[in-house]
Amino acid sequence: MSADEFSIPVLANIRSEAEAYLLMEGLRWDGTPVCPHCGTIGRAYYLTPRDGVSRSTRAPRKDGTQTRSERRVWKCGACRKQFSVLTGTIFHGSKIPLRTWLFVIFEMCASKNGVSAREIERKYGTTSKTAWFMLHRIREAMKREPLAGLLSGTVVADETWIGGTPSNRHASKRKPSRAPQSWNHVATDKTAVVALVNRESGEVRSEVVPNVRGASLRKVIEENVDMGSTVLNTDSHLAYRPIGADMPGHGMVNHQAGEYVRDGITTNEAEGYFSQLKRSIDGTHHHVSVEHLPRYLAEFDYRYTTNKVTDSQRMADLMGRTAGRRLTYRPLTTGE
């Protein structure tokens, strides 16, 4: 089955691991296996199990029983190495059934507010660590392509703060600000996030920044925007003015004066993105650490950017982004 033929009823009708592998092969390879070891296309052949259904995965136990798997194994005719559709992907080495993976990925693609690890733990009977690790691996696939081009046309830029209001915390849990910055004119240890939304394509790119001063904002904009062919829309934050001066156009609206739209100039796209992001963090996840916040931003960026396609199309597209993005547990938890 190709990505164009994939639909939610097809996913719902999966009854075995073999069927899950066949679906994944269709979504990723479209009928032509690609060797993940040497990159050769179309020269692999399927290794049929002796019983035609499953193969043993290890030596027999003391009681004579064996663990069997319906994993579909291929062998490359060029490099002579074996592989499956999961080799070298975010699923590599996972002991979770592929059928479970597919259902969890669909939930991540279809749930506008995201899905929490605790919810996956309850629904699919995994441990909390396994559910958390699965979702972060999926977020790894949702990350923006490394060679993605620069934004151009009309780009809306805005910033926000993520985290609980310091004044609402117990006195023993209040921490000093990580940097000499302010939010609503008071010192804060909230995390600053900047979002850039392309008005024509609908693509959003958000990043965690150390502060919302001119140097930090300019760095994000220069890395993601074609400065020579882009009109910038912002609020009246003074840090944007020297940046806008280096671009063909810079339109500003003054929120403090109650101005939100003027002659097509607005920051409503970014405000809407932040609104969804904060509702999801507060309602679904309740808390997101500063360390992993960029991964959650990648997830919400992906769903917002693809909001015009169906859930089936979004999931099929995500399957094509799973290769070469293997994520192991140790770097995720230790930063090594």
Image: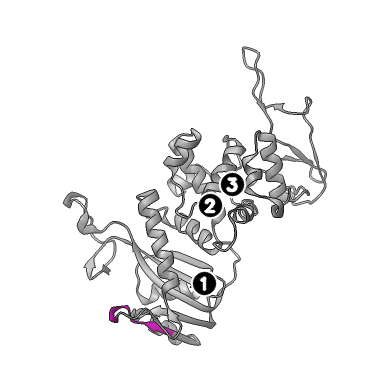
- Identify the colour scheme used: one colour
Displayed quadrant of residue 15 = top right
Relative to 164, is 182 above or below? below
> Looking at the image, which residue is at 41% across and 56% down?
293
Residue 135 lies, in percent from the top left, at 50, 46
Describe residue 179's horizontal placement relative to residue 98 as left or right.
left
Viewer-nearest of discs 2 and 1: 2
Residue 240 lies, in percent from the top left, at 39, 80
Residue in front for this viewpoint, 15 or 325? 15
> Looking at the image, which residue is at 40% across and 55% down?
280
* Crowding near the residue tagged with mark 1, few <14, some 14–19, many ≥20 C-alpha atoms within 10 Å: some
Amino acid on which the number 2 mark rests in the picture: Ala
* Image: magenta residue range: 251-257
Residue in front for this viewpoint, 46 or 58? 46
Residue labelled with disc 1: 224
Q: CA distance from mark 3 to mark 2?
A: 19 Å
Tell me whether the residue at label 3 lies in contact with that at label 2, contact meaning CB atoms closer than 8 angstroms.
no
Residue 102 lies, in percent from the top left, at 59, 43
Residue labelled with disc 3: 90
Tell me whether the residue at label 2 lies in contact with that at label 1, contact meaning CB atoms closer than 8 angstroms.
no
